[in-house]
Image (cartoon, rainbow, N blue to C red):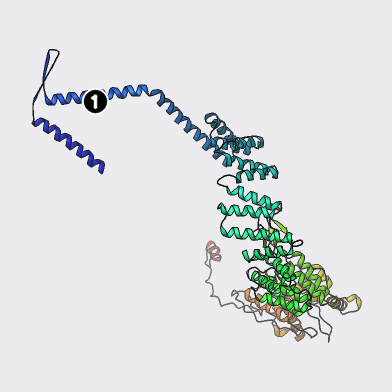
Amino acid sequence: MIRVLVYLVIVALLAFGAVWFAERPGDVAITWQGRRIDTSVMVLVAAVAAVAAASVIAWSILRAIVRAPDAMSRYLRIRRGVRGYRAVSRGLIAVGSGDARAAKKFTTEAVRIAPREPLTLLLSAQTAQLSGDRDAAVATFQEMADRDDTRVLGLHGLFVEAQRRHDHAAALAYAEEAAKHASVPVWAGQAVLEFRCVAGDWSGALERLERNMRSGLIDKRTFRRQRAVLITAQAQSLAGSDRARAIALAREAAKLAPDLVPAAALAGRLLGEAGERRRAARIIERAWGANPHPDLAAAYAALRPGDSARQRLSRVETLAAKGPADAEAALAVARAALDAQEFAAARKALAPYTATPRKRVAALMAELEMAQGDEGRGREWMARALNARRDPAWTADAFVSDHWLPISPVSGRLDAFEWKDPLAGEDHGAVIEHRAEAPTATPAAIETPPVGQAAAPGVTSPRARGEHSRPSAGVLSAKDADANASATSRSDPGEGGPPQTEASQPAPHPHPLPASGERERAPQADKPASDKPASEEKEKAQRAAEEGAHIDPFSAGGRSERRAMAAAAADESRAPRGRAMPAVAPAVIPLVHAPDDPGPNGEAEVEPAPEPAPPPADGWSRIRALFRP
């Protein structure tokens, strides 16, 4: 808008000047070397303007001719730079995409166009790394390290190559050299810190950590956490030689990071041994509230070395009440209760976690059963412990350690270990878990007792167990073995026992074909119930109740029928031991069936159909009438 206004103002001024000259005519006479030229003022002004314009044009042409070589060289230089930039850009894209062939092509072009440019050197080094030419990469990075503008970049490349060939001394030297730069790069400060930690130089690591904090490489929270880890490691190394110094360092670490379990456990143990039990208890309780851990429970239980097992149990229960109710608290209480032989307390603490137990829960349950004399149950829990999911452990970079370490032995990272499930965050498939299920009453597992003798519910024959199910634990208790032996002696006809009835035969296939006896009994099932003797009706009712515990889901009548049969099986399984099992009458199962389907009593409930119309006389019409609805 302003430019338009300026343009209009200039045009108006020119127009005003032209009008002013036109309104004031005059004559101009020029005499030069005996010649006289008469003209008007307007012509003179136009001639002056034309001469000025011609002079400007001539000067511009002369100037362009004089400056043509410089302009040409500048144009070629710009064009070369554009081509080099394009070659470097495409080369870096090829390196990023993993196309070594294209990367070499564009690297050659970039080196030909701009051989000493920093980006060209970087592209050459990365192309050599992509092609596997480590020597060429090292030579290029060394050339970059010798220049002031690419010094840190070259040192970083040399550091990476030294780590790849496992030359830790050279890697540390490159990192130390880069850390001397005015603006310390993050990788150099962290690398020097980790190298000193790997070497066990805790004092040097603390010094480097202070420099990283002053350089702004880490924030205050990270500084406090890493300092707590470093002085905890230093306190562990000094615990055997300088106990007073180790106590001071452990207390400082627990203050800097209250949730750091190794610091709190070490401080509590050292303070407890020094007689400062109250201070040690406060440190452990504060850490337990933030992060329950078995090391804290062990240190808290050992605050008084001369206490009895029951006193340690009471102390552990007090600690468990001060933190969140989780599995670690229950395991700590159960461990102390087992040591104190308080089996009821141990079982109560482990009860919420026995449905899907982990290894430690299953091992404690096995120890509990063994301590109470039930060797069979103990071995069963031991077998479950083998297949149970792993408990949390100190894990870092897929490395599991039985104790905490300040750095990862795999990558050398500081504060890498975490107390977590080693399988967390990874899909390892379903974990095999043995479930001890109560034996269900199947046709092969039920035997008909003699008259006046009660059948032991839930006892299966050895043949049925061998053919259908085998416990994963593979162990039977003595009581179960006696019950099985007695059941076998009653059910084996070769030893003088009563002959096996039809219900004691081996269990059929889940989709059985009807046996010959069943085919013979099939027509009788359609007869009314009133025509059968009372003993046959009772036997049929008992057999129906027994078969309700083993239902084929594909042959069941419906959801209501399956629910009723399952309820009958549950009632049978809840029958007390040592009592005669009464015959369970079959439940009344409502069926929704088609009009032409016989009902439960075998009577066809057929609705009266209308009389069909007389067939037509025509033959083809009679045939078509057969297919009409």
Residue 75 in picture, x, y percent from top left: 42, 28
Residue 503 in picture, x, y percent from top left: 79, 76
- Asked if one can make out residue 505 in the rendered structure from this viewpoint, the answer is no
Which is more toward the observer, 429 or 418?
418
Instruction: Check the image and report above or below for 52 versus 597.
Output: above
Which is more toward the observer, 397 or 438?
397
Which is more toward the observer, 569 or 346?
346
SS category of the residue bearing label 1? helix
Residue 342 in picture, x, y percent from top left: 77, 79
- Asked if one can make out residue 311 in the rendered structure from this viewpoint, the answer is yes
Instruction: Check the image and report above or below for 552 versus 35.
Output: below
Residue 533 in picture, x, y percent from top left: 75, 85
Q: Amino acid at mark 1?
A: Ala
Instruction: Check the image and report above or below for 410 versus 106.
Output: below
Toward the right, the furthest residue is 495
The residue carrying mark 1 is: 53
* Residue 612 image-quadrant placement: bottom right
In-image side of 185 versus 38 (left or right): right
In-image side of 398 versus 454 (left or right): left
